[in-house]
Image (cartoon, rainbow, N blue to C red):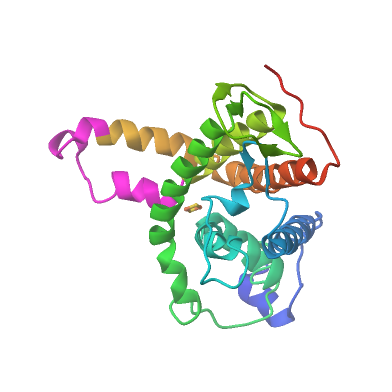
Amino acid sequence: MTTSVRDLQERGFGATLRRDAWWVAPALTALVLGSFAIYATWAAWTGTNYEWGPYLSPFYSPYIRTSWWPLSPAFLILIFPLGFRTTCYYYRKAYYRAFFLDPVACGVGEPRHGYKGETRFPFILQNVHRFFMYAAVVFIFILAYDVFLATRWPVNGMSGGVMAPGLRQFGVGVGTVVMALNVFLLSCYTFGCHSLRHLIGGGVDCYSCARAGKARFRLWRGVTVLNQQHMLWAWCSLFSVALTDVYIRLCAMGVIHDVRIF
Ligand code: FES
């Protein structure tokens, strides 16, 4: 006798014939995403310890100084990367399962019986993902510029993590490497985006007939390679953003000391 999806739905939420630990993935997702949301909100709220020497936390980049905004500048910045992540096709699947239990896993009974997809408010807003993608690409260049600045050390040294004015010289510290690795992982995540892949390769039946077809085909192949591991890049870049902020914050607080490699 076979059990259909409808049978499971009728038996109610959580009904399943699965014998594996299907609940581990959504539970871990809820734990990690929930922890990241709490940490990012706290880090943005504090408005302190986000820079040390030539290093700047990705939560506070680009560097903004304003008098009209009463809160931390991070809230002005994080709208874009967080909007990009929360509307990401992969993360949608992950947090629908982890937080809405909808569906909690394949072959497991759901809490509801109707399905409207993402055709109504608020979920229809997920369609803005493409626009957040444009912003995310710009952020990659901003963060790459921060890495360049993180190689510019003051010739006159520093005092308490504050750069002395004057000439700069090339140098690399552990923080520079941490920031560069973060940009690499964020690039793999951003340039493997489904929307970007569609933007480059969508609506084309024949690359050799399309304008700039050869270049588009090469780009599309590159994006596809990254897109195949989109979930991996999504998680690695989430950790790297948080860890880069933690590293710079601990340096700024004097808890750890950055090591200059050369
Ligand atoms: S689909 Fe995941 S970043 Fe665009």
Tell me where residue 117 appears, x and y as whole percent.
Answer: 49, 74
Tell me where residue 82 appears, x and y as whole percent.
Answer: 56, 60
Identify which residue is drawn at 73% across, 80% down: 12
Quadrant in the rendering for residue 218: top left
Tell me where residue 66 appears, x and y as whole percent.
Answer: 52, 64
Quadrant in the rendering for residue 167: top right
167 to 131, vertically: above or below:
above
153 to 119, vertically: above or below:
above
136 to 55, vertically: above or below:
below
Identify which residue is drawn at 69% across, 33% down: 175
5 left or right, relative to 80:
right
Quadrant location, the C terminus = top right
The residue stretch that appears in magenta: 192-215
In front of the other: 251 or 218 = 251
Identify which residue is drawn at 50% across, 37% down: 144
In front of the other: 179 or 103 = 179
